[in-house]
Image: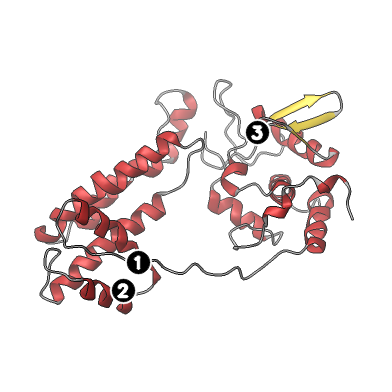
Amino acid sequence: MFLRQLLVQAGVVPPRDDDLERIPPWLDTLLADEPEHRARPIRPFAHWFVLRRARRLAARRRHPSEVGRELRKQIRVAPEFLTWLDAQGLDLSTASQTDLERWLSCGNTRSYDVRYLVAWARSRQLISNLWVPSRARPQPEHLLDEQRRWQLLERCFDDTSIALDTRAAAALILLFGLSITRVRHLTTDNLQQEDDDTYLKISARPLLLPPKLGRMLTDLAGGEHQRSRYKQRPDLQKWLFPGLVPAKPLSADGLQCELRELDCSPAQPGTLPSSLLPLTYLQPP
């Protein structure tokens, strides 16, 4: 992927969604050792249900999403379930709801991803009326109170021992409750300068940035603090948070790892409540 992105950067090949394009060769490897009677239903399930749905969503999505890991989970559980059915002397057409629930009770939370195979098989009338029950969502384990949030913001603005892009990303999340996906896909076009004020254009109404954060993002836009060693072509969008891979923004996993240094990663449920949205940051407590 790195070599291809260098070619994209050089204008030799067009951009593509590598997260989706790498699934078919991975699927061939996954099914290489599977007997034909198990591989036969998995191929159309993966190509015409999982991948087709992912491509349809990608076409409507405003920002690319790193979904490869999730797609692999949805597909990988299919041969596991079919292998278990083989061991029980069953197949998709003869499995009952009781059999399905036995499979779920013997596995872990990942086993519930079999819902995608079941939905596809039901739509193709390959199984009887089987349903995967809903799984309870985990409750938040860590809530960020108002005092701690302001302490983290002060550190984002003043602790220069931490990389500038890490501090800027954390400040955007703490102030506006932006998702990691939204932050990592910000470009220089999202910044707007009017007199001495800096605005962030992420909706119909630009957001006025505190002066310190405005300067941080302006410095990032200037490219002086970027970690990538490869300069972007002028005709490509210029990421505020470029990754090490040419012509790509910082990965979601990479940004999450950096945010953990400041203890404000939104990977933890409940860390960033919706109450962050009002612009009360202009009047610190």
Left or right: residue 119 versus residue 153 is: left
- Closer to the chain start, of discs 2 and 3, is 2
Which residue type carries mark 1? Tyr
Query: Gap between marks 2 and 1, in whole Å?
Result: 7 Å
> x, y (%) of residue 59?
41, 34
- In the picture, the disc for residue 104 is 2
Distance between the Cα atoms at labels 2 and 3? 43 Å
**Residue at point 31% right, 61% down?**
115
- How many numbered marks have been drawn onto this rendered protein structure? 3
Q: Quadrant of residue 228?
A: top right
Quadrant containing the C terminus is: bottom right
Q: Quick one: 193 or 121, which is closer to the camera?
A: 121
Residue depicted at x 27% and y 47% = 49
Instruction: Indicate which disc, 3 or 1, sits on the residue closer to the N terminus.
Output: 1
Residue located beneath label 1 in the image = 112
Q: Residues within 10 Å of mark 2 (few under 14, many from 20)?
A: some
Above or below — where is 4 with respect to 29?
above
Mark 3: amino acid: Ser
- 111 relative position to 37: left or right: right
- For label 3, the residue is 203
Q: Position of residue 18 (x, y in %)?
A: 39, 40
- For marks 3 and 1, give the CA distance: 36 Å
Q: Are marks 2 and 3 in contact (CB under 8 Å)?
A: no
